[in-house]
Amino acid sequence: MDLVVQCYEATRAFPASEQYGLTGQVQRAAVSVPANIAEGQAREHKKEFLHYLSIAHGSVAELETHIEIASRIGYLEVDVAHRLFGQTEEVGRMINGLRRSLRQARPQKGQSAD
């Protein structure tokens, strides 16, 4: 969620002409990360949760690409881009750790293995 807030704050400085372009793409990719995690967690089966975590991880990669583009064309200051990259790396590690944990977890008595 902190990453979403930071992305929204960073995109405020983007040109108005990018409102429906890069600004929207950065914001949508950022929002997609926690939204997919939440949706997956609400599903009934571990396999579905893992699927949504994979989508969230893809959104992190998409967001990193948008940040790099914004940085290269001068919409983001270098320090802001570095801060955002630090956040995306942390979120990516957290998602991967959760995925690893879920894959290794044994089902509890009375639960299915999926």
Image (tube, rainbow, N blue to C red):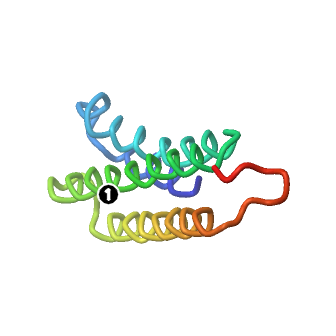
Left or right: residue 55 compared with residue 69 = right
In the foreground, 28 or 9 = 28
Question: Of all residues shown, which one is farthest toward the right?
Answer: 109
Residue drawn at x 23%, y 58% as measured from the top left: 68
Horizontal and vertical percent position of residue 104: 61, 69
Q: Residues within 10 Å of mark 1 (few under 14, many from 20)?
A: many
Horizontal and vertical percent position of residue 103: 57, 64
Residue drawn at x 67%, y 39% as measured from the top left: 43
SS assignment at label 1: helix
Left or right: residue 1 compared with residue 22 = right
Compared to residue 38, the image places residue 106 above or below, namely below
In the foreground, 64 or 83 = 64
Horizontal and vertical percent position of residue 56: 47, 49
Compared to residue 100, the image places residue 45 above or below, namely above
Left or right: residue 48 compared with residue 19 = right
Residue at label 1? 64
Residue drawn at x 35%, y 51% as measured from the top left: 63
Question: Of all residues shown, which one is farthest toward the left?
Answer: 73
In the foreground, 10 or 33 = 33
Q: How many marks?
A: 1
Compared to residue 2, the image places residue 40 above or below, namely above
Left or right: residue 74 compared with residue 45 = left
Where, by quadrant of the figure, is residue 82 drawn?
Answer: bottom left
Amino acid type at circle 1 is: Glu
Residue drawn at x 26%, y 54% as measured from the top left: 65
Where, by quadrant of the figure, is residue 12 drawn?
Answer: top left
